[in-house]
C-alpha cells in the first residue's frame, strides 16, 4: 500500500519514521525547502539521547502532482489552520479509492474534508508529544504514542482493517476502533481542557496548581468542556474524565499543551479548532462556559496582535 503523509514535522515526521522502520512504502508531501533538507540531512528523529537518521526518505511536492499518481492512503498531519492549503495540495494525489485519514485536532475539519473527498474520508486521531526543533530534528518529548482510526459512520470495514494493518510501525501503537468519533471527542475534551487551563493561566500544570485556586479553576474548566461534549452526545468515559482531571491537577507537573507551547513561541495556534468551536457549540446550546470563553478570548487577543 502506498501511503502519502502530508507534512514531515512533529507528527508526520514521527509516525512516518516509525512506518519507514517497519518497511512501509511511505512518501512525504512537503514544501520545497523541507524536501531539500530531507534530501541533505535525512529524516532525523530523537528519542532521549538517541537520534535515528532515515536517509533519503521519499518526498513529493505539489509540483509533482502530475507524475506521482494517486496514493492508496493519504495521512493528514498538518495543523488545523493549514487545512485549506493541504486540501488543495493533496487533491491531485487522491484517486477514487484513496483513503483520506486526518489526524487533526477537534472536529471542525471533518465537514471541510467530506465536502472535498466525500466517503473517502475516515476518522482518525493520534497521541504523541513531539516537536520539530530549529535544526529540523523531530524530538519525542514523552513516551507513549498511538494512532487510532475508524469509519466515521461507525463499525469496521475491509478498508479500515487493511489500513490499520498497514499503519503498524515502530515506536507507536496502532488501533482500529468501531466508534472513532467518540475517541476523537475524548481527545478533544483533553486537549481543550489542557489548552484552556495552561493558556489562560500562562503556565505549566504544576505552576498553576501551586496557587491557592489553580486546581479549582482547572476542574471548573474541565467541567465546562465536559458539559459541551455531553450535550453534543459524546460524554467522556469515567476513565477518560479521571485521566484529564488527574493530569491537570497534579502537583509539580511540568505538563503543558501544544496550544500553550505554540502561544509561548509566538507561532500560529489552533485556537478556533480546539477552543473556538467548543465555545460556539456552547452558545448554540445555551451552556454557560465563562472560563472556556475567557481562554478563547485571551488567545484571540494574541492572534489579533500577530
Image: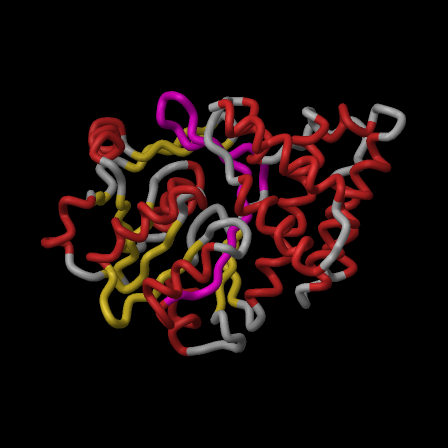
The N terminus - image quarter: bottom left
Q: Quick check: 152 above or below 39?
A: below
- Can you tell which quarter of the image residue 166 is in? bottom left
On the question of residue 18 being in view, the answer is: no
Q: Along the horizontal axis of the image, is 188 left or right of 149?
A: right
> Of residues 151 and 50, which is closer to you in this image?
151
Picture colour scheme? secondary structure
> Of residues 196 and 58, which is closer to you in this image?
196
- Can you tell which quarter of the image residue 167 is in? bottom left
Q: Residue at x 69, y 41 (%)?
A: 293
What residue span does the magenta drawing correspond to?
A: 121-143
Q: Residue at x 70, y 60 (%)?
A: 285
- Residue 107 image position (x, y, % from top left): 53, 56
- Residue 192 image position (x, y, % from top left): 64, 45
- Residue 106 image position (x, y, % from top left): 55, 52
Q: Along the horizontal axis of the image, is 233 left or right of 260?
A: right
Is 82 covered by the magenta stretch? no
> Of residues 295 and 45, which is closer to you in this image?
295
Is 138 covered by the magenta stretch? yes
- Residue 47 image position (x, y, % from top left): 49, 33
Q: Along the horizontal axis of the image, is 247 left or right of 30?
A: right
Amino acid at each position: 500500500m502506498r501511503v502519502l503523509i502530508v507534512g514531515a514535522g512533529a507528527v508526520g515526521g514521527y509516525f512516518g519514521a516509525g512506518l519507514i522502520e517497519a518497511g512501509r512504502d511511505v512518501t512525504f508531501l512537503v514544501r520545497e525547502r523541507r524536501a531539500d533538507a530531507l534530501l541533505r540531512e535525512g529524516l532525523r528523529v530523537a528519542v532521549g539521547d538517541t537520534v535515528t537518521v532515515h536517509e533519503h526518505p521519499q518526498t513529493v511536492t505539489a509540483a509533482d502532482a502530475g507524475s506521482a499518481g494517486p496514493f492508496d492512503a493519504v495521512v493528514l498531519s498538518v495543523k488545523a489552520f493549514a487545512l485549506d492549503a493541504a486540501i488543495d495540495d493533496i487533491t491531485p494525489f487522491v484517486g477514487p479509492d484513496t483513503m483520506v485519514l486526518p489526524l487533526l485536532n477537534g472536529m471542525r475539519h471533518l465537514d471541510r474534508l467530506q465536502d472535498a473527498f466525500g466517503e473517502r474520508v475516515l476518522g482518525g486521531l493520534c497521541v504523541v508529544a513531539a516537536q520539530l526543533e530549529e535544526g529540523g530534528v523531530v524530538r519525542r518529548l514523552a513516551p507513549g504514542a498511538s494512532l487510532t482510526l475508524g469509519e466515521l459512520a461507525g463499525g469496521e470495514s475491509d478498508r479500515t482493517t487493511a489500513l490499520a494493518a498497514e499503519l503498524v510501525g515502530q515506536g507507536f501503537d496502532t488501533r482500529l476502533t468501531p466508534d472513532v468519533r467518540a475517541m476523537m471527542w475524548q481527545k478533544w475534551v483533553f486537549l481543550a481542557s489542557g489548552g484552556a487551563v495552561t493558556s489562560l493561566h500562562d503556565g505549566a500544570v504544576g505552576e498553576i496548581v501551586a496557587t491557592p485556586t489553580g486546581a479549582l479553576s482547572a476542574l471548573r474548566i474541565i467541567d465546562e468542556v465536559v458539559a459541551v461534549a455531553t450535550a453534543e452526545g459524546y460524554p467522556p468515559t469515567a476513565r477518560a474524565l479521571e485521566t484529564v482531571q488527574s493530569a491537570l491537577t497534579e502537583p509539580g507537573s511540568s505538563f503543558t499543551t501544544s496550544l500553550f507551547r505554540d502561544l509561548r513561541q509566538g507561532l500560529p495556534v489552533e485556537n478556533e479548532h480546539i477552543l473556538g468551536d467548543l465555545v460556539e457549540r456552547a452558545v448554540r446550546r445555551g451552556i454557560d462556559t465563562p472560563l472556556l470563553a475567557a481562554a478563547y478570548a485571551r488567545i484571540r487577543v494574541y492572534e489579533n496582535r500577530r
